[in-house]
């Protein structure tokens, strides 16, 4: 504001300009040291992530989980080249992902390391997340170009390791929580599923959640919808591998075009924010439901403000959102770009705009918000 706009006295004749003194920013030595130390840790994590993908693909973690081994023994066990296995093991030990006994030169995995890297039934089997991370590096050039053009990068335009990694990483959470915790947190849904309900899983990807549901509730009928043709093909294959469940099918369609009505339950697992028009999708879901039906919305865990999300979970999700979810939404009609850290308040707004009268947080995990919406 100046004197004219405030109505104050006119300024005196301009005085000669004082030289502008630019404060020299002197780094604090201690803070610099700790920040560079943090960056070295981040660089090491970013570099070693590719080794997790390699180790999982080659079965190295599972083979080491069978028992302690030297590099030669693990190479023998996996029929891989010893020199590569030795370097990989050294990196794993430096990461703390495996233990190393310098006396015998043997590597091993403790119970916690096995749960994270080797045991697919564990609730913390998070090794496949590194395939999702790999896709962000592989497709980085597409997103960088999109920053300049403002256009989107569709889910389907990513490297296939994104689809595989998402299926396998997200399944860990669904296996641990969906039937045991999330469904019982919804009003009356488990009873209906036991008795025989009609259920749609929209944006089902490779169908990890749909298959788990169909296995748990044989009296109910399930359909998984996704706009991504290749994902639906993989979901059908996964269903065959699960024993050709008679109560399950998969169809290619976008959320807004999902067919049918009178569903007891419609679910969206970690995908509403990926859609260009989540309000339109919510409206369609509202129309698909019986008057007393339920919409189960599972989204990445987030608080309602950026300041509250400045933590490791927020860091991971904002990063994934920048590289995958936001470009994916911008590639579709409307392009609302909710982002993966929308939070309960914003998601509730979207659901209300879509016509849902009652929305509540049913439960949560460190990774997910679970909302129940009723017409
Ligand atoms: C992060 S993945 C989650 C997949 C799956 N629900 C899971 O939990 O494994 C997001 C999914 O949303 C799907 N998707 C994105 N936009 C969609 C739309 N408009 N209609 C239907 N599916 C959509 C993508 O193809 C992708 O499979």
Image (cartoon, rainbow, N blue to C red):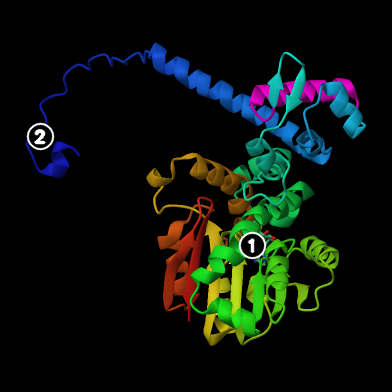
**Tag 1's secondary structure?**
loop
* Circle 2 residue: 10
Q: Predominant secondary structure in magenta?
A: helix
Is 292 included in the stretch rendered in magenta? no
Q: Residue at x 85, y 28 (%)?
A: 74
In the image: residue 372, left or right of residue 132: left
Whether residue 309 is visible: yes
Figure disc tally: 2
Q: Separation of disc 1 and disc 2 at Cα?
A: 55 Å
Q: Residue at x 11, y 30 (%)?
A: 11
Which image quadrant is residue 133 in?
top right
Up-down: is 34 above or below 61?
A: above
x then y, percent, for residue 178: 60, 64
What segment carries the magenta color?
81-98
In the image: residue 285, left or right of residue 341: right
**Tag 2's secondary structure?**
loop
Residue in the foreground of this view, choosing between 286 and 4: 286
x then y, percent, for residue 370: 51, 63
Q: Residue at x 58, y 27 (%)?
A: 42
């Amino acid at each position: 504001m100046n004197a004219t706009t405030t109505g104050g006295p006119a300024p005196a004749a301009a005085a000669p300009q004082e030289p502008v003194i630019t404060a020299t920013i002197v780094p604090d030595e201690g803070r610099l040291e700790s920040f560079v130390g943090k960056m070295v840790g981040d660089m090491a994590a970013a570099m070693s992530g590719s080794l997790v993908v390699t180790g999982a693909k080659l079965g190295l973690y599972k083979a080491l989980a069978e028992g302690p081994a030297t590099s030669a023994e693990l190479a023998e066990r996996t029929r891989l080249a010893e020199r590569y296995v030795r370097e990989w093991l050294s990196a794993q030990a430096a990461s703390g992902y495996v233990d190393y006994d310098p006396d015998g030169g043997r590597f091993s995995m403790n119970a916690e390391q096995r749960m994270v890297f080797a045991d697919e039934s564990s609730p913390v089997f998070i090794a496949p997340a590194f395939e999702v991370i790999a896709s962000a590096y592989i497709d980085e050039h597409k997103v960088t170009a999109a920053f300049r053009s403002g256009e989107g990068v569709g889910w389907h335009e990513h490297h296939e390791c994104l689809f595989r990694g998402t299926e396998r990483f997200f399944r860990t959470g669904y296996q641990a929580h969906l039937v045991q915790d999330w469904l019982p947190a919804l009003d009356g849904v488990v009873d209906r599923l036991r008795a025989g309900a009609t259920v749609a899983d929209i944006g089902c990807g490779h169908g990890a959640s749909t298959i788990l549901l169909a296995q748990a509730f044989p009296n109910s009928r399930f359909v998984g919808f996704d706009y991504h043709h290749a994902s639906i093909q993989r979901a059908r294959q996964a269903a065959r591998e699960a024993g050709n469940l008679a109560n399950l099918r998969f169809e290619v369609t976008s959320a807004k075009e999902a067919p049918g009505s009178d569903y007891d339950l419609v679910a969206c697992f970690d995908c509403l924010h990926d859609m260009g028009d989540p309000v339109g999708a919510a409206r369609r879901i509202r129309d698909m439901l019986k008057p007393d039906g339920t919409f189960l919305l599972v989204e990445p865990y987030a608080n309602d403000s950026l300041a509250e999300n400045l933590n490791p979970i927020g860091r991971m999700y904002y990063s994934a959102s920048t590289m995958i979810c936001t470009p994916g939404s911008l590639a579709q009609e409307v392009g609302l770009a909710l982002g993966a850290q929308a939070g309960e308040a914003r998601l509730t707004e979207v659901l209300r705009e879509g016509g849902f009268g009652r929305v509540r947080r049913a439960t949560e995990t460190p990774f997910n918000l679970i909302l129940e919406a009723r017409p």
